[in-house]
Image (tube, rainbow, N blue to C red):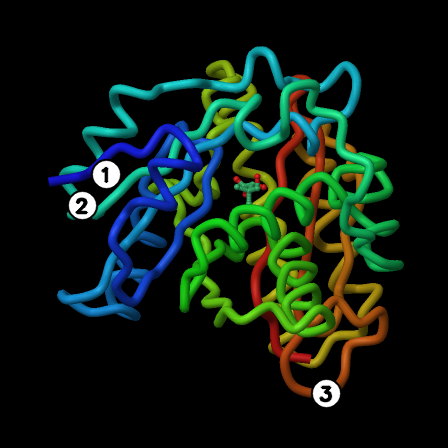
Amino acid sequence: MTDVLTSIDELCAYPTRTRGLVMTMGALHEGHLSLIDLARQQVGADGQVLVSIFVNPLQFGAGEDFSRYPRTWDADLAACRDRGVDAVFAPAASDILGGDGDMAVTVDPGPLAALYEGAARPGHFRGVLTIVLKVLNLIRPQYAVFGEKDYQQLVLIRRMVRDLDVPVTVVPGPVVREPDGLAMSSRNVYLDGADRSRALALHRGLLAGAALADQGAPQAAITDAVERELGDDDIVADYVALTGPDLELVPTAGDGRLLVAASVGGVRLLDNCGVRT
Ligand code: PAF
């Protein structure tokens, strides 16, 4: 049985056991479901897995896709039931943001939020971290699982938890891919047939870059290889970056992260993978 909690009052009245949280904006896909499974692994059969579903207006810029963001409540709830989620927290915007949605105090995401996604979407990470902190404060989970697909978001959430001493363990979930390699994303539904095929260039680029990294190629050769794969499909990268695991600008020897973002047919796509540096 999956309980549905549609207000903060209902959430506060809900019994508490060891909690694992998966925060989402709905439009659940296999990537989210893998995070739900990870949350269950953390809390065990006696613990509680909660999924929050809230399309957060604070993290969308003017002219972005807030109003057309896919909203698939019935399918989301059915998927949560199938996966043994204990409760779905789906508050109304007025409940979670206050009547007028006017928040005077928000989370400053720091300098890392000016790079990559933050450069393309000013204010995005302030909106993300503000809602993530609010939902963590409301649900008070012991574990919160976030996907590596939005890698910069994951790093910033970890940093917020560390810098503000938020009492939660952040658990990362690996990127889940379609059989042809496309990273799963709720926004993939925006891709039409031809653009859906072109979008595969992002994953091909990452594979090419990771293979070069394995051979000890220099940083520029690795990022060039990604850009070349995109270029073959007439895609111009918004950014390709090889960083450290916490998005350090200069990767240290060992683990690195290769990130790519590009717009394909007007749809902003992100992908990344771990590489040896
Ligand atoms: O990754 C997402 O879906 C959102 O950014 C999150 C973490 C649910 C915050 O709204």
- Residue 155 in the image: above or below residue 98: below
State which mark lies toward you, 1 or 3.
Answer: 1
Say which amino acid is labelled 2: Arg
The residue labelled by disc 2 is 83
Please give left or right for residue 89 compared with residue 86 in the image. right
Please give left or right for residue 265 compared with residue 16 in the image. right
The residue under the point 80% across, 48% down is: 116
State which mark lies toward you, 3 or 2.
Answer: 2
Residue 89: x and y, percent? 37, 37
Please give left or right for residue 111 compared with residue 40 in the image. right
The answer for how far apart the CA atoms under marks 2 and 1 are is: 5 Å
Residue 253: give its label.
3
Please give left or right for residue 116 compared with residue 134 in the image. right
Residue 174 makes an appearance in the image: no
Residue 238: give its label.
none
Residue 80: give its label.
1
The residue under the point 33% across, 21% down is: 73
